[in-house]
Image (spheres, rainbow, N blue to C red):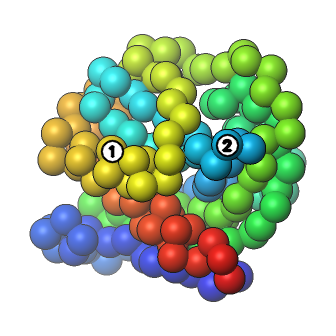
Amino acid sequence: MNCIKILTDEDFGLSSIEFNNPRIRYGARGIIVRDDGKIALFNKKNKNEYKLPGGSIDFDESPKDAFIREALEETGCKIKIIKELETIEEHKSLDNFKQISYLFVGKVVKDINKLSLTKKEKDEGAQLLWVDEYEALKLIEGCMDNLIESKYENLYHSKFIVLRDKYILQYYINNKNI
């Protein structure tokens, strides 16, 4: 898989420092589409953050299985992966941390209407929205300068999340007919 973007501290006007045996985390995330063409968008209203569904890959999971699990937890939908995209990387040198995310497009096959949110997600006011892809992009772009820190995540991490998901959504929009 090719990498669509490597996000670094420079993307936020910061200077990167050299990594020293960084922590590495693998994730699976992407676009979940309903029959009406609307996509899932996760809003953490207490942080004013909009993001795409996804999360960490557990040690015994494949990236595909992780995306299917995350989709069910965060959207309450059983999905079928219809497209594998590329990867995206976050190089957070100020935290000595790298994240590599595998990207997918999933189609809703059944909505069970039950989210399985973590305590963190509940505390941050998580809610699921279904919007058209351009509205999603507008919401993601619009929240970058108005993010609010939470007790779980500082603004440094939140900005990486939002910018990462902006690039993922732009990539999807620009390549969905290929």
**Residue 29 point in image, percent of width and height:** 62, 53
Residues under labels 1 and 2: Cα distance?
19 Å
In this view of the protein, which residue sits in the foreground, 140 or 157?
A: 140
Residue on which disc 2 sits: 36
**Residue 40 point in image, percent of width and height:** 58, 40
Q: Earlier in the sequence, mark 1 or mark 2?
A: 2
Task: Judge from the rendering whether residue 82 lies leftward or rightward of residue 6; answer left or right.
Answer: right
Crowd tier of the residue under label 1, counting other residues whose Cα lies within 10 Å: few below 14, some 14–19, many 20 or above = some
Per the rendering, the mark at residue 152 is none
What residue is shown at x 23% (from left), y 47% (from top)?
A: 142
In this view of the protein, which residue sits in the foreground, 64 or 134?
A: 134
Crowd tier of the residue under label 2, counting other residues whose Cα lies within 10 Å: few below 14, some 14–19, many 20 or above = few
**Residue 43 point in image, percent of width and height:** 42, 31
Task: Judge from the rendering whether residue 93 lies leftward or rightward of residue 42; answer left or right.
Answer: left
Hey, what amino acid is under mark 2? Asp
Task: Judge from the rendering whether residue 93 lies leftward or rightward of residue 173; answer left or right.
Answer: left
